[in-house]
């Protein structure tokens, strides 16, 4: 899957050879980090929602047995 370029200097370094390959690897790494960060953010959001639900449950239980 080819992504649009995120490196501002990509047009000048995208030449044949190792510099172009290095830029491609760097760009792929940035995309992987971005995807990983998005997945972690979603997981943290879900955990926060679960904690909120547990807090509501504990509060309801405390009110019931007071």
Image (spheres, grey):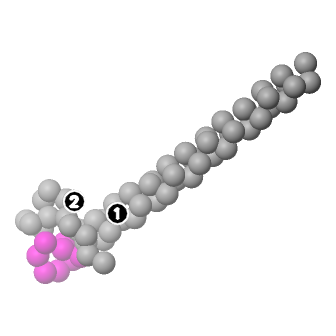
* Label 1 residue SS: helix
Asked if residue 20 is among those painted magenta in the image, a careful observer would answer yes
Q: Quadrant of the N terminus?
A: bottom left
Q: Is residue 25 above or below residue 55?
A: below
For mark 1, what is the residue?
Answer: 31
Question: Residue 24's spot in the image, x, y percent?
Answer: 25, 72
> Furthest-front residue in view?
64
Q: Is residue 40 above or below residue 1?
A: above
Asked if residue 24 is among those painted magenta in the image, a careful observer would answer no
> Residue 46 vs residue 41: left or right?
right
* Label 2 residue SS: loop
The answer to whether residue 65 of the structure is visible from this angle is: yes
Tag 1: Cα neighbours inside 10 Å, few (<14), some, or many (≥20)?
A: some
Which residue does the image show at 20% across and 67% down from the upper left? Answer: 4
Q: Quadrant of the C terminus?
A: top right
Which residue does the image show at 40% across and 64% down from the upper left? Answer: 32
Q: Which residues are magenta?
A: 14-21
In the foreground, 57 or 10: 57
For mark 2, what is the residue?
Answer: 6
Based on the displayed image, in which of its 4 quarters is residue 19 positioned? bottom left
In the foreground, 28 or 43: 43
The answer to whether residue 22 of the structure is visible from this angle is: no
> Residue 2 vs residue 42: left or right?
left
């Amino acid at each position: 899957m080819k992504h649009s370029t995120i490196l501002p200097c990509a047009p000048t370094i995208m030449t044949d050879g190792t510099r172009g390959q290095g830029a491609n690897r760097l760009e792929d790494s940035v995309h992987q980090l971005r995807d990983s960060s998005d997945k972690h953010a979603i997981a943290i959001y879900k955990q926060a929602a679960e904690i909120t639900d547990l807090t509501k449950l504990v509060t309801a239980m405390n009110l019931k047995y007071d």
